[in-house]
Image (spheres, rainbow, N blue to C red):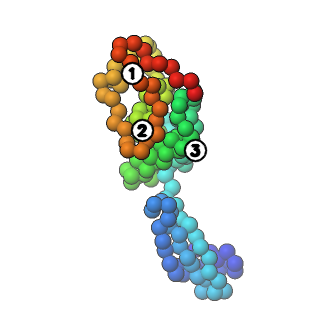
Amino acid sequence: MRCPYCRHADSRVVDSREADDGQLIRRRRSCPECGKRFTTVEEAVLAVVKRSGVTEPFSRTKIMSGVRKACQGRPVDEDSIALLAQRVEETVRARGAAEIPSHEVGLAILTPLRELDQVAYLRFASVYKSFDSLDEFEREIAALRDEPPVREAGTRHAVAPRSGGGRAPKING
């Protein structure tokens, strides 16, 4: 590592520590030439391979943007969207690969989004899975009804209560 002060081509690592739940490594370094110390931060780069073959860096912001569109008009707060994006990033990083297909990122979004808001899930799934007909929507809705999502403790979520046999009351938000 080149010294930022004297531009000497080498430095010595004095101390290394993990930060951000192991996602970053902070290294304290010392330059043998000028004697000054400096800190470097290393982060494992995760690349997403798109269908076209183009590779781009993973972006939590991009995940949040897509989920925010699916949640538009729904009773989902910004903190819940940020937590979902963090969970998706943790899921894809846990696979241990330096590159991940965009398809797998989409799959990693579906489960936590389903737990967060079923209508937002349907919106996202309809685009992600390229629904072409009402039958596909109906199958997805039937699957939602057959397998209700398990909520994690502490998850903030507003759902309209189901009434006896009619429609769920509309929530204005």
Counting residues from the start of the chain, the first of labels 1 and 3 encountered is 3
Q: Tally the numbered discs.
A: 3
Observer-side mark, 1 or 3, equals 1
Could you tell me which residue is drawn at 41 percent across and 24 percent down?
161
Could you tell me which residue is drawn at 56 percent across and 34 percent down?
68
Quarter holding the N terminus is bottom right
Tell me which amino acid carries mark 2.
Answer: Pro
Residue 58 picture location, percent across and down: 52, 47
Residue 45 picture location, percent across and down: 51, 55
* Residue carrying label 2: 112
* Distance from Cα at disc 1 to Cα at disc 2: 21 Å
Q: Residue furthest left?
A: 146
* Residue carrying label 3: 61
Observer-side mark, 1 or 2, equals 1
Element under disc 1? loop
* Distance from Cα at disc 3 to Cα at disc 2: 16 Å
Viewed as shown, does residue 41 lie left or right of 166? right
Element under disc 3? helix
* Residue carrying label 1: 162
Q: Relative to 170, does residue 91 appear above or below in the rendering?
A: below
Element under disc 2? helix
Tell me which amino acid carries mark 3.
Answer: Thr
Counting residues from the start of the chain, the first of labels 1 and 2 encountered is 2
Viewed as shown, does residue 131 lie left or right of 70? left
User: Viewer-proximal residue, 149 or 1?
Assistant: 149
Counting residues from the start of the chain, the first of labels 3 and 2 encountered is 3
User: Viewer-proximal residue, 128 or 79?
Assistant: 79
Tell me which amino acid carries mark 1.
Answer: Arg
Residue 69 seen: yes
| Quarter of the rendering containing residue 166 | top left
Instruction: Classify mark 1: residues with Cα within 10 Å, few (<14), some (14-19) or many (20+).
Output: few
Residue 36 picture location, percent across and down: 65, 83
